[in-house]
Structures are given as C-alpha cells and as structure tokens.
Image (tube, rainbow, N blue to C red):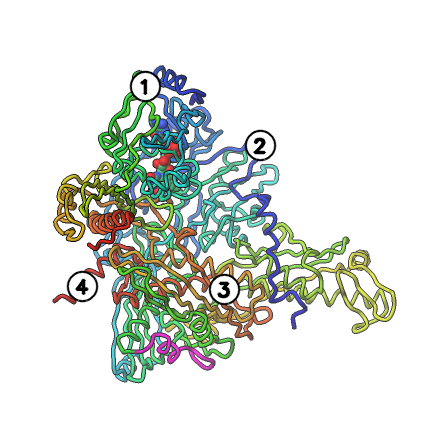
Amino acid sequence: MSQGYIGKRVKKVDALDKVLGKPLYSVDLHQEGMLYLKVLRAPHPHALIKRVDVSKARALPGVVKVITEADVPWLKTYGLIFKDQEVLVKEKSRYLGDRVAVVAAEDEKTARQAIKLIEVDYEPLEIITDPLRAMEPQAPKIHETNQAAFEHPYNTGNVLAVDHLVKGDVEKGFAEADHIFENTFRTQHVDHVALEPEAGMAEYDAETDTYTLWAPCQWTHDIQTDVAKVLGIKVDQLKIVQPEAMGGAFGRREDISVHIILPLMAKLTGRPVKWVMTRHETMIMMTKRTPMTFKLKTGVKNDGSITAWQSEVIGDTGAYASTGASIVHQAMYVSTGPYNVANVKGVSYTVYTNNTYTGAMRGFGATEAAFAYDRQMDCIARDMGWDPAEFRLKNAYRVGSRTGNNQLLTTSVGTVDTILTAREHFGTKGTPSAPHKKRGVGLATIMFGCGYGEGFPDHSIAQVQVTDEGRILLRSAAADVGQGVKTIMVQIAADVLHLPPELIDLAVNDTATTKNAGSTSATRQTIFSGNAVKLAAENLLGKIYHRAYQELGRAYPELSLAEGDVILHGTTKQMTLGELAQIARAKGEPLAAEGCYFPRTDINYENAQGEVVYLTFTFNTQYVEVEVDTETGQVDVLRVVAAPDVGVAINPAGVEGQSEGGVAMGMGMALMEDQVFKEGITLNPDLATYLVPTALDVPEIKTVIVESGDSCGPYGAKGIGEPAMIPTAPAILNAIEDAVGIRLYDLPATPEKVLAALKAKAAEGGK
Amino acid sequence: MTVYFAPSALTEAVAYKKANPATKIIAGGTDLLVKFYEELDSLAGLMDISRLAELKVVRTGEEVFIGAGVTHEEIADHPWLQENVALLCQGAAEVGGPQIRNRGTLGGNLANASPAADLAAPLIALGATVELAGAQPAALPLEDFFTGPGQTKLQPDQIITGVKFARPGANQGGAYLKLGKRKAMAIATASVAVLVTLEKGCLADLCICLGSVAPVPRRAKKTEDILRGQKLSSLDLGPALVQLQAEISPIDDIRGTAQYRRQGAEVIFRRALLQAINNLGVEVNG
Ligand SMILES: Cc1cc2nc3c(=O)[nH]c(=O)nc-3n(C[C@H](O)[C@H](O)[C@H](O)COP(=O)(O)OP(=O)(O)OC[C@H]3O[C@@H](n4cnc5c(N)ncnc54)[C@H](O)[C@@H]3O)c2cc1C
C-alpha cells in the first residue's frame, strides 16, 4: 500500500536547478591547463589506409600530441556485444566516422588546424550501402574476421547474425487461413538528436596510475569495464563520474563515444583533456536507429482471427555491430505485436554495410517492428472490410494469451483497455479546413517487453542510509537522462520511509561509490532501480524500527515515523532520525541498507521460445487525426490521443512527459527524419537539413493513463520510456491511408512520397 | 587575428569598407556565423553594422523605404506594412523561428542571396530597387541584383542601405506562399510571390516571382504575359501553368527533387494568384 507519494505529481527533483541553469553538462566542464582533442575521421567510407603522415600536424605550435594506430598498437578492440571496433583504424576504414588520428592541442582552434595538416593516402574499395548487396557471396567482406560465422545461405562474412523464431506450425496455420496478406515495410536511419553532443573530460594521476572520466553514460559500470579492457587496466583504475546533467540519450549513450580516447589521451599527455564533438561529427559517426526491411505474411480466417504469421527481417547494422544484432532479432521476435497468433515463424539477418553504424534507439527493434505489424494489421482490416479498431480488439492479447516467444501472459495485460480508452477519448474526426485537404484517423496498438529479457543477467542495486543530520542519502548508479528516474527513486524512498521527498538527497553518481544499476534503457529503470530502492528503503525502515525499539524500549505498533522523527505513541517521547542514526553508528550498526532487484528471464535461442522472455509488458494505443494536402502531399498531424498502460503511474506527470516527447519523436520518424546516404556519405549531417518536428508541427497531445496494475515493478508499475513513441509512426501512416486511400510502406512519409502515391492512385483510377 | 569594428555612422562604415574591402559585413549574423562556423578566425575582419541608425529606418507613404538593418520581426509586426504590403510581412513571418526573425535583417537576407530568401520574392514582386552606399550611392532593380546562388552585383566597397518601392494601389493585391518540409525553421522547397493589379474585372497587370526553383529568385515574365489582360470571369490558368514550368529550372537536392519542386511551385503559384485576387475582395476560381 502506498503511503502518499506514489501516483502523485511530485515535482521533478532536478527541475528547479535545471531551470536556473545550475547543473553542469559535459560541455561545461573545465579544468586549468586542460588540452582540447580533435579527431581525424576516415576520408572514405571503405578504403585501405596506405599511409598516414602526421609530421606537419606535430610540428604546428600549440600541438601537444598526435597519435595514430601505430602509436597505440596495444589497444584492444571494443563493442557492446561483438568487439569489432578499433579505437583507431589500422588497415582500413569501414565507414566515414572511423578514427584515423587524434590531436591534443592547447586550444580547439589549433587542434582543428592540426587535423587539416594530416595527410592520408588511401585506396578506395567498393562501398557497400545496400544490405542485399552485402549479403551476396561475391561482395567484399567489410570485416575480414567476422566473429559470427554462421551456417546459413547468406554466409558471406557480412552477415553478423541470423536468428530464428518458431512457434507452432506456420504452414499448418496458413493452410487454415481463408486469406493471405503479404507486404514489405521499410524503416530508415534516424538520429537520436540529443541536444547535447557527445562530450567529456578526463584526467590521469600518474602517482596512483588512475584515471577519472566525466562523460554521460546510460550505464556507467558497463562502460567502465569495457574501457578498462581496451586500455588494459583494472576496473578500479578508472573512475567514471556521471555529469550532473545529461542533454538526452535515447539509447545512444549506451555506446562508447568519447570514453576511451579521453582517458587514453589524458595519460599520453599527462594533462587533463576535453573533447566536444561537433553536431556534424555526431551525425556521421554515432549510432543510428537500425534501418530494417520486414517481409510479412499473415494468414487470416473469414472470422478475422489470425492463424499464421511469417516474418523475415533484414537489418542494416552499418559498419559495426554495437547492439545491432539484438535489435534486429528483437524486432523479429515481436513482429506479431500484441496480437494472438498460434503459428509464427521468423528469421532475421543483421548485416554489415559501410553506412553509419547503428545501435540502441528508443524501442530497440520494437519501434521498427510496430511500424510493420501495425501497418500490416491496418491493411488487413481495410482489405477485409473490418473497422481497424474492431479488428485489433478481436485479436488483441488478453490474460492467457501467449506471445510470439510463447510467454504466457498472466497479469497486467491492458491491451484492450488501451484501445477502448484511446477510442473513447478521441471521439470523431473533424471536417477538412480547405477543399483540397482531406482528414483521416489512424490508430496503432503496441506492446513492449520491459527489461533486457532473453535470459540476460539484469539487475539494479541501490543503497540508502540515514545521515547524522537525519536526512536520507540515496545512492544509485541509475542514469537520469532527463526521463526522471531520480524523482521516481526519491518518491519511492519517501513513500516507504514516511518522509517528505525534500529530506532525501541523491549521492554523486560515480562508479567508485555506487553499485551497478544496469542501463537506462529497455524501459527498465522504474522497474529495476525502483524495486531496488524500495527493497533498500524497506530494509532501512526495518533497521530504524529495530534501533528505535532498542533505544525507546517499545516495539511496533507503539512506534511511528513522521516527518523525520520517531514517535512513541501515548507519550511525549520522541527522537529525531539523526539522533537515532548517531547512536546506531556509535554502536557499530549504522542505519544503512541495500536493495537488489535481480529477476530471472529465459529464452531458447534455437526457436526463441521461453517461459519469461521479458519481465512484463507495457501496452500503448494512440489515435491520430491527420489532414493531408492532396495537392502538395503535406501531412498535418492535428491531434493525438495516447493511452499507455503503465501498470501504475508512480508519477503521472512523468508518464505524460514521456508520452508527449515520445509522440513528437514518433512524428519525426513518421514524416521527416531520415539520414540520407549517398555512397556511404551522409548528405544531411546537420540540423538545417536533417529535420525534426518543431513546436509548431507537434499538435495537442492528450495522454490518458491506463493502469492495469499488478506488474512486477514497484507498486505494480511498468515502464513508459520507449513504448511512448512506438505507436506514433504506424498510427500516422494508417491515418494517411484513411484520409486519402494511399498505402505507404516506407518511412518517412515525406510530402514527395505522399504526392507521388496520390498521383499513382489517380493514374490507376483513370485507367 | 580577426579585426572587429563597429561604426556608429554610415559615412564611417563606407569609409572603413573602402579602406578594408576584405572585411566582412556582419548584421544579425544568422547567415554569416553559420557559414563560418568553426572558421571565424579565418576572416580578415568583421564590420558590425548593427549600430547604424540610418539602416533601421522604415519610411512609409507613397514611396516606401525599409532600411537594411530592419529585422524580419520588425517587418512582420509593422502595422502599416501589414495593411499595405501584406505579402512582404508574410515573407518576413516565414523566416526561421522567433530567434532568427529577431536577429536576421533585410540587408543580410538580400546580400546572402539564397535562391530561397524569403524577402527576395515579395520585394521583387513589389518592383523594389535596392539602394547601395559606396564611393557613389547607387540603386538598381532588385530583380537584377542577384547573379547566382550566393552571388550579387554588390561591390566589395558597397553596403546595402535598404530597399525602396511604391506603395501598392487600392486595386493591387498580393500574396506570398512557401512550401517547406515543416512548419517553422524550414528553408523553402519552393516559394512564390504574386502582386496583381485589377481593373474593370480584368487582371490588368501582375508580377510573379518564384524562389528555390532557379539559381536566383526568378520572375516568371512570360507567364505574366499570358495572364495579363485576362478577364477574371473567364480566367484560364492552364496555359500559364504550362508556361510557368518553362520558366523555372529547379534542381534535386536534400530539400526536394526537381520534380517535386515543379509540382509544388505550380500548386502554390495557383493558390497565391487566387489569394492575391481574393484579397481584393474579388472571388475567382481557377
Ligand atoms: C536557423 C536558421 C533559419 C533560417 N531560416 C530562414 C528562412 O526561413 N528564410 C530565409 O530567407 N532565411 C533564413 N535564414 C537565413 C538568415 O536568417 C536570413 O537570410 C537573414 O535575413 C540574414 O540576415 P543577417 O542580418 O543575420 O545577415 P548576416 O549573417 O549578418 O549577413 C549575411 C551576409 O550578408 C552580408 N550583409 C549583411 N548586411 C549587409 C548589408 N547591409 N550590406 C551588404 N552586405 C550585408 C554579410 O556580409 C553576409 O555575407 C535562416 C538562418 C538560420 C540560422
């Protein structure tokens, strides 16, 4: 039972400081005598590096150090799952972001000039931009030594991973179907567009042979171990300090960006070093959303029930693996969405190309999959004459359903509720604002498995203690990337300990004084760190009561806690928490406790079947109204109603914030965002040509929270971070089809594509 | 070392520019600072003209003068201009977002000479001349000012002081429309300004200028010829729309394909023409 801080619109704990401009972001960091770094990137997306001459750069006054691979041959390779990435490339470049040399100089201007003085001779190789070309047996191999050599028909060395899912008997399912629907859908490269570019600062202490790194991380401890391995040092020689504030993450700050080169250069120069990437650099070199092609085949009976579903997914991981293979297989695993299908078969291929490498981005495959399955569901509904919402209701998961991974859903399944709630609050569409405009309504219903799942060890540890001043110090490594996990943790601790949130302080977040909280990804921190804090606070509460019983001589229920005092009922006797903490510490039993949440998941990778493949699922339905200009192809999103099932909303304002941001991000993916490549070269590496929606483009968003409760998260909560954006893109394309009858299969739905489809439709009609 | 100089009078600015022709003029800096991002130190010098009172003047009346230092926001919000030259205010209101409109100036917009410049097409449609200070004061039709993307007839010793045009008559109406990929902060994929003169139920005269569909803001004179003199009651746009296509030469780039620009230009031209006529209280269909 909640004591009063759960389900409340508690103000974000860091809101006021942020508004006042107090917290330092990595780009704000500064130290006396620090050097500035710049990196020379590959001059060609796929080329042998024949010669690198840094002599002119080294001779430039103000330049302190210039290194190439030849200077640091002992560095190990890195990567989140496959260690396929070199810190500095040795023999060849695999994409335009590959690093050839690093310069450290007294100021940024000198570092920039030095970069221009470095000469590189290279021999161009074929640039592979199309995954289908990469999969051809005769295609040049991007990684000569592919660590994942699989037995499969496409085994060319460019295929990083092939994954399978088998549930039931898909052929039998198709035989039972009255109708078969086959469609191919495609998603694009999308940038995270975190406001803050990749940046950080590092220093090295020669006396103790230790490093300190300040740089944003979604998971400090995992980056720490990766970096230590690459540098060949012990984990405790490197301390990572999470900067006070982070200018966005969206999955990308799970990957290494500045984290190896900064400590390396700090040691090689003996001076503090700072590095801030330009927007241009972050756009060409950092991870992107993985573009995927989905070939879907669905069998449906006359009564609307789905008998079989087959998915083939090809994902372009780009030049490096990062988490690409997991993203692509997850997209395939969830490609039936929240819909009952007894017979499912899926295969996915993760393929290397010379495009910018891809990695985690809000949804981790589920966003791409939802675009495909919710378009597929909509197309089927329209072709069979079903109302799109009714068709979804007919097939939606309920308690007792089994997912594509064959996981039995036993609790907290709000699929139907999200559809009914969103539909009710949406109402009906309005009339067009001009004769050449048409209006349409679209919906999409999605689900998202919270936590890493798939048997991956997944946990969070939190610590709480009562200070001598009677305040609570909460230690957690959970990264607050803006989503508000700090506030959630404070709310939970306050709730358990019967204290106002103002009495709770968050400790500095660094690897030396916190324990692993896992990543701020997979929509898991409310569940994982929320549970860890709850467990820690409950342990602490027990210690407080025990100590009070010893000091005051009475036991529960004669004791109670209020506003930081321990009160003995029926008397005037009371003690402050601070007094109690001092006594406890003096007696060698400090009021401190730890909590760890470490649930188990499982999967059989042969067929992707398991019992608890993901811990719990968030569901979300969005309704969208659009107006399409039939002469220019421009699409206006007029309003959005979102109904996410978050189990229990620990902080409704936080859920709404995520929902609104998610819709805006989904709109960008639906209508305009697209990193355009020509021969491996990004044509729009800046925010003047890579467009995201502005405040004028994003309409009124109404979020109606559905609380199906009873989830494994604290108080029954589930996560919202990723599922907030997942329905938006398919809902918008479904609405466009509703408005003007065109069937779009590719993202984004730019005015050009919409107009071309309208013209094609008119030409067909004219025949 | 980049030398920074901020003159306080136009004569001082002219003399300085003559003595230092390599010095770059900076007004709002919204084009210049982007263009020279990370390379500002490569500039020989900067002359900041934002303190020149002479350039901040807006003179209204039968002859209108707008100083080069007037910002987009000032144009968009100017009540007299809104009343008399709404198409220019529409153009100014289309520029970037509030921050850009508060810094960016008319002079910078013209000197930067983007084919997409949002003030160029409406000013050309209004028949504006651009006024230049230098060794000799000079003036030339804005229509002839642009010579290519980023290129103009501006000499190294010259400064744009402003634009001048006649106040449109009671029988003249205009409109400016822009096609962009989002609702704000978007460089035009295509844009069009139209100024019409109506007499006795006829389209007595008109001026059409398109942006982003040619190397410079482009008048569509032959399209004007086809439409000039047509009766409003029997307005036939067909041949004009065909001619329009012959007068533009859009390219493929990241903001749009040539084909889409052609389709879009045609649509917004038709809409702008009808809007310009409708703005005079005359209902037409086309
Ligand atoms: C985010 C963003 C969005 C934008 N959106 C738009 C848009 O939608 N539409 C649009 O048209 N433009 C847009 N721009 C471009 C720019 O804001 C405008 O062109 C603006 O009017 C430039 O004016 P300025 O005073 O800032 O020029 P500056 O940057 O100061 O100068 C630009 C050029 O003009 C020269 N110059 C300036 N004043 C004079 C003068 N009086 N005499 C001679 N030369 C001079 C300078 O030397 C320089 O070469 C955008 C820019 C940004 C950064």
The three-letter amino acid code for the residue at tag 2 is Glu
Ligand 1 shown in quarter: top left
The three-letter amino acid code for the residue at tag 3 is Ile
Tag 2 subunit: A
* Separation of residues labelled 1 and 4 (CA atoms): 57 Å
The residue stretch that appears in magenta:
A386-402
Q: Where is residue A221, by image quadrant?
A: bottom right
Which mark lies nearer to you, 4 or 2?
4
With respect to residue A76, does B50 lie above or below?
Answer: above
- Residue A491, x across and y down, in percent: 63, 62
Label 4 environment density (alpha carbons within 10 Å; few <14, some 14–19, many ≥20):
few
Count of labels in the image: 4
* Residue located farthest toward the front when viewing the structure as drawn: B200
Q: Where is residue B188, by image quadrant?
A: top left
Secondary structure state at the residue bearing disc 3: loop
Badges 1 and 4, same chain: no
- Tell me if A79 is positioned left or right of A224 in this view: left
Tell me whether circle 1 and circle 3 mark residues in contact (CB < 8 Å): no
Residue for badge 3: A720
Q: Looking at the rendered structure, which numbered label has been put on residue A32?
A: 2
**Residue nearest the observer in this picture, B194 or A253:** B194
Which mark lies nearer to you, 1 or 2?
1
